[in-house]
Image (cartoon, rainbow, N blue to C red):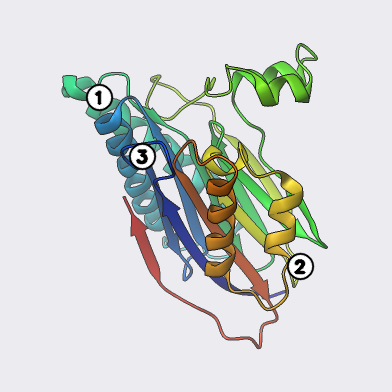
């Protein structure tokens, strides 16, 4: 099945931070999307997320445009995984030769859409959601201390939501020589939407509210991004907030096509 996409992304500094360390990129023509949330000081976080975003997109675009890559699900899996590993190498190498950026890193969550097939990759605690039938389903698994403690039964979800360890992530791009990304796949349907977002949103906006906002009829992807960011700021705004929304419509609907990079 062929679905048309309408996408948009928006980032906001929030109410507390002095700089915005989030980056994003989208390319509707290739169905390729990525969001990164940097860490390691103001300069380091911005550099890490921007470099990871640029490297991921450049590598994935090159891989996906090779002969044999179009529509081949196995090729797509390998392409986005290779792009993630390339982003890890680029950030780590920059930190190694420039002492100003020692210890910097970034989360990364990406999506690739071919036809009605969604492929997601993540490292860190930035998330990918599928919104369907009025419900937001988190497809990715957070690589964070609190999330892994909940999965192991060492902490309840309520304890995790109030823990002082919420910002501690267990995997990141650029921190180690090797990184282990997680890969998720999902079939898409007409009327679906997906969201890639940083923890500046998910710390303050529950899944039920994400679903409500992104399930509003006749709402544009950009309006969904704006409303999500407004809600995150109204309920805390303690971090940078980035939302990337992709809506799926019937093949006869108008499709927005293009390439956008914010870094």
Q: How crowded is mark 1: few (under 14 residues within 10 Å), some or many (20 or more)?
A: many
Q: Which quarter of the rendered picture does the N terminus lie within?
A: bottom right
Q: Helix, strand, or loop for circle 2?
A: loop
Residue 189, given in percent of the width and then of the height, sits at 76, 67
Residue 55, given in percent of the width and then of the height, sits at 33, 45
Q: Helix, strand, or loop for circle 1?
A: helix
Residue drawn at 34 percent across, 55 percent down: 262
Disc 3 and disc 2: Cα gap in Å?
33 Å
Residue drawn at 66 percent across, 71 percent down: 248
Q: Quadrant of residue 90?
A: top left
Q: How many marks?
A: 3
In the picture of the structure, the residue carrying the numbered disc 2 is 189
Mark 3 touches mark 2? (CB < 8 Å): no
Q: Quadrant of residue 220?
A: bottom right
Q: Residue 21 carries which label?
A: 3
Residue 187 appearing in the image: no
Q: Quick check: 19 left or right of 16? A: left
In the picture of the structure, the residue carrying the numbered disc 1 is 95
Q: Quick check: 156 left or right of 71? A: right
Residue 166, given in percent of the width and then of the height, sits at 58, 23
Q: Nearer the viewer, mark 1 or mark 3?
A: 3
Residue drawn at 57 percent across, 17 percent down: 165
Residue 209, given in percent of the width and then of the height, sits at 72, 52
Residue that lies at the very extreme toward the bottom in this rendered image:
252
Which one is in front, 98 or 67?
A: 98
Residue that lies at the very extreme toward the top in this rendered image:
154
């Amino acid at each position: 099945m062929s679905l048309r996409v309408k996408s948009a992304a928006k980032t906001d500094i929030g109410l507390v931070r002095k700089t915005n360390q989030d980056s994003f990129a989208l390319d509707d023509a290739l169905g390729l999307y990525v969001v990164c949330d940097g860490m390691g000081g103001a300069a380091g976080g911005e550099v890490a997320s921007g470099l990871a975003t640029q490297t991921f997109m450049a590598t994935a675009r090159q891989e996906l445009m090779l002969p044999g890559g179009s529509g081949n699900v196995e090729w797509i899996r390998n392409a986005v995984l290779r792009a993630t590993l390339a982003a890890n190498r680029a950030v780590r190498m920059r930190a190694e030769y420039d002492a100003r950026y020692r210890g910097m890193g970034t989360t990364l969550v990406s999506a690739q859409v071919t036809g009605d097939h969604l492929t997601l990759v993540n490292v860190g605690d930035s998330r990918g959601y599928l919104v369907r039938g009025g419900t937001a389903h988190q497809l990715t698994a957070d690589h964070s201390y609190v999330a892994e403690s909940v999965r192991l039964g060492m902490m309840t979800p309520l304890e995790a939501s109030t823990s002082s360890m919420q910002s501690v992530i267990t995997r990141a791009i650029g921190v180690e020589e090797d990184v282990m990304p997680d890969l998720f796949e999902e079939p898409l349907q007409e009327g679906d939407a997906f969201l890639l977002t940083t923890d500046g949103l998910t710390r303050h906006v529950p899944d039920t509210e994400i679903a409500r906002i992104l399930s509003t009829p006749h709402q544009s992807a950009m309006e969904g991004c704006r409303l999500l960011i407004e809600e995150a700021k109204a309920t805390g705004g303690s971090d940078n907030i980035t939302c990337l929304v992709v809506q799926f419509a019937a093949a006869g609907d108008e499709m927005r096509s293009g390439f956008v990079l914010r870094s």
